[in-house]
Amino acid sequence: MIMDDPDAIPVVGFVYDHWVIFNLPAATRELPEGIGRDAVLPDESMQGTNSNGRIGYDGPCPPSGQNHGYVFTLYAVDSVLEIAPGATKANVLAAIEGHILAQAELIGFYQSP
């Protein structure tokens, strides 16, 4: 799953990646609150590096008064990715090329005060 902010382009000059998490077990139906920043999680899924250069999730933070759409894209793939924890979005997208069985997208909006 990748969570990014395409509305950040005018602000920072690129799509801002807030979360990269991969190799989630197929039976996963939800993600617990407070996952933390461990690169390898107890269920053996792995977190990647976000645009802030950190492992794990960084929440929405648009400039004051701006409303941004945060895109969550979930990919179903046909194999475990053979990439290291801490991989970037680009690494994950390259690894899943040709292996995507299905994908779903959810966009959530957040406006900072």
Image: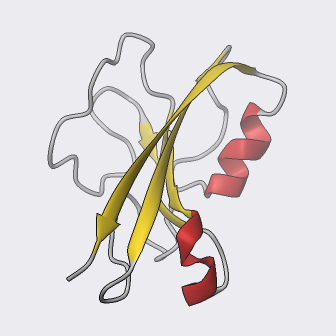
> Which residue of the protein is positioned furthest toward the left in this rendering?
33
Name the spot of residue 76 as percent of width and height, x first.
59, 20
Q: Is residue 101 visible?
A: yes
Residue at image coords 67%, 33%: 82
Residue at image coords 78%, 44%: 94
Residue at image coords 66%, 17%: 79
Name the spot of residue 1 as percent of width and height, x first.
50, 39
Residue at image coords 27%, 25%: 30
Could you say which quadrant of the image residue 100 lies in? top right
Q: Is residue 55 left or right of residue 35?
A: right
Q: Quadrant of the C terminus?
A: bottom left
Q: Is residue 93 above or below residue 24?
A: below
Name the spot of residue 91 as percent of width and height, x first.
70, 51
Specify the color scheme. secondary structure
Q: Is residue 75 above or below residue 95?
A: above
Q: Is residue 91 above or below residue 81?
A: below
- Which of 112 and 42 lies nearest the eye of the viewer? 112
Name the spot of residue 8 as percent of width and height, x first.
54, 76
Q: Is residue 97 left or right of residue 42?
A: right
Q: Is residue 19 visible?
A: no
